[in-house]
Image: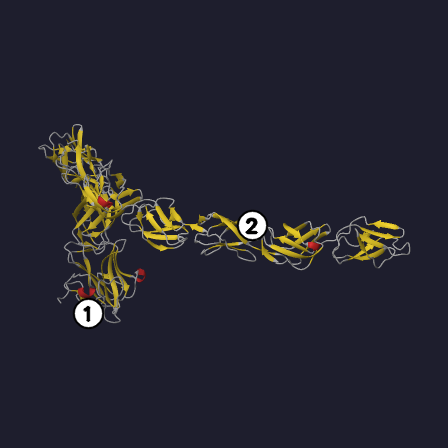
Amino acid sequence: LNFDQASYQAGDPVTVNGSNFLATGFEPTAKRGALVLVPSSVTDTSFQLALPDNALTSSLSATNGNGTATSPTTLKVRPTINGDPAPNEAAAGTHITLNGKTFTGTSSVKFNGVVAGFVVGIGGTSLNVTVPASAVDGPITVTNAGGATSTTNPFLLDGKVASFAPAAAPGGANVTINGTGFGLAPVVNFVHAAAPAQIVSSTPTTIVAKVPPDARNGPIAVTTPHNTPISAAIFKPLLKVLSFDQASYQAGHTVTVNGTNFLGNGVPTAKLGATPLVLGTETDMTLQFVVPDNGLTSSLSVTGGNGTSIGPTPLKIRPTITSGPLPNEAAAGTHVTITGKTFTGTTSVKFNQVVASAFVVGVGGTSLDVTVPPGAQSGPISVTNAGGTSTSATFTIDPRIASFGPLSGSTGMLMTINGSGLLGADRVDFAGGVSAVPTNVTATSLKVVVPPGATTGHVSVHTAAGSSPPSAGTLTVTFSVTSIAPTTGDYNTDVTVTGLGLTGVTAVKFNGIAGVIQPGGTATVLHVHAPAAGAISGHVTVWKSAASVQTPQDFTLLALSNVAPDAALPGQQVVLTGHGFTGATNVEFGIFDANFNVDNDGQITATVPTRATGSTVGVTVPGGTATSAFTVLTVRINEFSTGTTGASEDEFVELENTGSTSADLKGCQVIYRPAASTNGSTDVVIGDFTSSTVLAAKGFDVLGGASYPTPDFAHPVDLPAVGGGLALECGTSHTISDSLGWGTATNAFVEGTAAGAPAADSSAARTPDGTDTNDNSSDFTQDSTPTAGAQNDAP
């Protein structure tokens, strides 16, 4: 015998396959165990059976007249579940009922694979099942010897919170929540928290979650897929101080305290050490307060309804300097007062990093009396306590001299000055009006060489703070030179040396070359002739045997012995001869700077500058200036006429030597420039003095037009009546000696304002002759009777 399926349920038709069921001519009988069954649809090889409601898994036998056959395997009858369990949604531990058939012999009941306890009802038609603790949503499966059957619809497991631990914790701490039915993605909420808690781990029965920083007293709620159970117990968030918004503060500063759960159970209070604080703005995660005037560095404690938290580090309160120091400038040893707050507990006071060992904190910590230390340096004063450091405005250390040595000696001697406030000293002042730059400068000492020119007297030190009072002691200078005169001169110049202790002088050297000491010297005055040759510019040293002192001024070899020529026009070259021209910085004719070239130490070639005047020429070198007589010649364009319109027979340009010395026009040109021309590209030479042309003092030279009768020099162009410009230029550089513009002229030859254009048969003339105010309109007047080559008519 065998069956058409592997297993069946009560009421299922069963087809039994075999052979010879009708061999005796009669239908066989059948039994399932001891239960008699009535076959139907019998054939020689098969028959059918209907399984009754009480059918259980067992063997099957069939009997006919020839005997009985038993199935080699059992006929398996699995459970039948009618509909959903009641209820079909519940929490773990709930008893539910499954109705159906063939529950007798049930071996297991599982909620989506999780084994549950059960009791089979009478007749095997019901099951009373307890929802297991770790159950999850899914079908319920009932298994017996015949197989397993599952519910059609899933069983829905409701969540349930059983407990949590710890009962109180600060924000960020882990809380373990125990229960059932939490599902795969539960959401945990604490009272007042703006966002769900962070889940660290979860199972259907256990959740580990972090306490939100803004949680407050209340139950914990867990949202599952089907419900939101709430804990029976109340969770208490513990407030916690985490940090401060700054590293340190001063009295009056607003402090922001960062933390968690400050409002977990009511409004908190706070203390700085033992000092109660008045809280300002309060939130779940921040508190604010103003540091009181008497606040000192100490721990901060915050207390709420659930407990007290102390900050992880002390709240640091550094000093506050409100005014001072008074005075703000003083010497070492002076008492100064600093006013402020939080000076109690001061550990150090420094003057620009130099420790002041002597200070006293005033009553209430609002003042400091400090003694300026000996090595103090100008700069801010810093005050330090346990909370940090604060600095004042710059305090200035005045220099003071305590002592110096040696007390006497000659100039050039190295001396040491001791005192305070000397750092940054830039000079030491000596009697005699001279100073020296110190070396090896510290706050308390320096070294300095007694400079040339120093005399017996007190010394003082100068710093950025000013000058120290004169030293108490007197420096006695036994050998010095206070001056030499002159400081520039030629070889063999007589130089007067003035000083102290000059009796017994054995040599006076100019840049190392000995001069000739003259007889008749005294202890304070000595005459010496400069050396007759050599490079004598430089330091002058006065010797007494092996001892020497340097003069405060250097001597410069400089002499201007000859000027050739000794008179010239602007633009003409002049050769200067003498000594000491190397390094010359300027050559001046009168007050006008000239272009020049140093040919060698004894010669300079210079060009008389444009429009120069004066009666001297000078050469300047770094050590001084040498001058010589020189005459700047003045030749002026004294009168001109543009002639009758259309004719040139009466056009002329008159030059006059207005000086008292003859002038040679060699190398000079008279230039005409059109009225609107702005440069020399359209210039026309109307007079070119290529050879010597000497004008006597007050003499004239006339340049005439093409038809002018008997000119001194004929010019090739007509001069437009409406306007133009004329210039007298000399030398290769075309230096302008004199120029003018008339009528519509706007070119560079115009001096000041252009002169009026002369009328026909008239001229424009300087009246009186040679008048030159550097304004053409003022210098020239109309002359109806031109006087070419002669004195102009009176105005």
Residue 547 rendering spot, x and y as whole percentages? 17, 29
Q: Name the residue under label 2.
A: 205
Q: What mark, if any, has residue 364 been given in the picture? A: none
Residue 242 appears in the figure? no
Secondary structure under the numbered disc 2 in the rendered image: loop
Disc 2 marks a residue whose amino acid type is: Thr
Q: Quadrant of residue 380?
A: top left
Residue 144 rendering spot, x and y as whole percentages? 71, 51
Please determine whether, in this image, residue 149 is positioned above or below residue 325: below
| Pick the front one: 407 or 193 | 193
Residue 107 rendering spot, x and y as whole percentages? 69, 49
Instruction: Single out the residue that lies furthest toward the right.
Output: 24
Q: Which is more N-terminal, label 2 or label 1?
A: 2
Residue 789 appears left or right of 10? left
| Pick the front one: 428 or 657 | 428
| Pick the front one: 194 or 392 | 194
Secondary structure under the numbered disc 1 in the rendered image: loop
Disc 1 marks a residue whose amino acid type is: Ser
Residues under labels 1 and 2: Cα distance? Answer: 130 Å
Residue 82 appears left or right of 67? left
Q: Which quadrant does the C terminus fall into?
A: bottom left
The local crowd at label 2, few if under 14, some if 14 to 19, many if 20 or more residues have their Cα within 10 Å, is many
Residue 181 appears left or right of 124? left
The local crowd at label 1, few if under 14, some if 14 to 19, many if 20 or more residues have their Cα within 10 Å, is many
Residue 281 rendering spot, x and y as whole percentages? 35, 55
Q: Name the residue under label 1.
A: 762
